[in-house]
Image: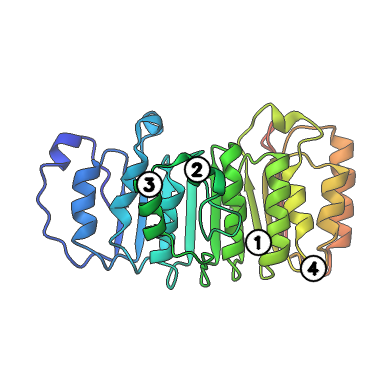
Amino acid sequence: TFRPRNLSKLNQLQLDCTHLQELRLSEAVAIPWATQLIQANPGLRLLHWVRSYSRAMLTSPSDLKALFPLHQLRSLQLVSWKLNAVSLYRVLDNNADSLEDLDFGYSTTLLDEPRMNDEWSGLTESSLARMTRKEVAIATQWIQERPLLLSKLKNLGIHLSWSESSDAICHLVRACPSLESLSIGNITNELASKLAKNLQEFCPKLRSIHDKSLVSGDLLQESHDPVIHVIDACTPGTLSHIELIHQRFSTRLTKALLRHQDGLETLEIEFLHERPAGVLRNVCKVLDGCRDRLKKFSLIDSAARCEEKMA
């Protein structure tokens, strides 16, 4: 793990490591130095790389090429990156036979172009039309012209800086038939609807949902309830763990939770400050409906920071 305070001193280090299995890099690490270290350790099983939030806009999409030598990753986390879809496809496809955990951390963005098709088997026609012959040749070489398949992926985190191009990430779950746990944050209603549709069709094993949204103006609007789309997409009774942060404990959320009363074992909610009577009424409905299976319940008022725990 490298978390140096002095960038110049770090990049002067001469490391002869060739058998590393886990590598965690901080925002202070320069791309050339990190690339050399990764190339010297192609057997890495875990790579967590955090880029500087303040410098996220300076990150080059080509930086992802540093990961091309890796083919045995089980866990990959990228925070504050700008991602090129073609390069991302190659990284994921290179590790398709081993990858179990994938996390796109906060402030990570997916570039508008080039854009993958819904099946993640190639670029969209509009993207190809905008590319040069050389760019098309490279993309064709890197993309296998078959749908991406991450058959072993169980845990997926998508905490992006959401944009119009983010629908490609919503379609990425089509490649994850073994997905068991999904963590999302600050997704829009529209994108959540697309994500939910794909989860319903392609991720039958999903049993754990974590919504770790940061407080924003959208969250205060009654019409903003994207996580409910995701919860409703799961087959009734299949979800066993739900964790929601900065969520309104609305009547609609209550109904969505009760659809999973036959399977829900853990429920943790940090709710936005609302009318206490309404919250308590909905809490009682959920506890009554889930009493046969629920083992852990945590309720936190985001404003008052009062916590009740029941087991």
Asked if the residue under mark 2 is in contact with the one under mark 1, i.e. CB atoms within 8 Å, the reply is no
The reply, left or right, for residue 141 in relation to residue 35 is right
Q: The residue under label 2 is which amino acid type?
A: Ala
| Pointer 1 residue | 208
Q: CA distance from mark 4 to mark 3?
A: 51 Å
Asked if the residue under mark 3 is in contact with the one under mark 1, i.e. CB atoms within 8 Å, the reply is no
Visible residue check, residue 23: yes
Nearest to N terminus: mark 1 or mark 3: 3
Q: Residue drawn at (25%, 43%), measured in percent from left and top?
A: 31
Q: CA distance from mark 1 to mark 3?
A: 44 Å
Label annotation for residue 129: 2
| Pointer 4 residue | 237
> Regarding mark 2 in the picture, which secondary structure is present there?
helix
**In the figure, 274 relative to 143: above or below?**
above
Residue 137, percent across and down? 37, 53
| Pointer 3 residue | 133
Visible residue check, residue 308: no
Nearest to N terminus: mark 2 or mark 4: 2
Residue 197, percent across and down? 73, 56
Mark in front: 4 vs 3? 3
Q: CA distance from mark 2 to mark 4?
A: 46 Å
Residue 229, percent across and down? 76, 50
Q: CA distance from mark 2 to mark 3?
A: 10 Å
| Residue nearest the observer in this picture, 234 or 195 | 195
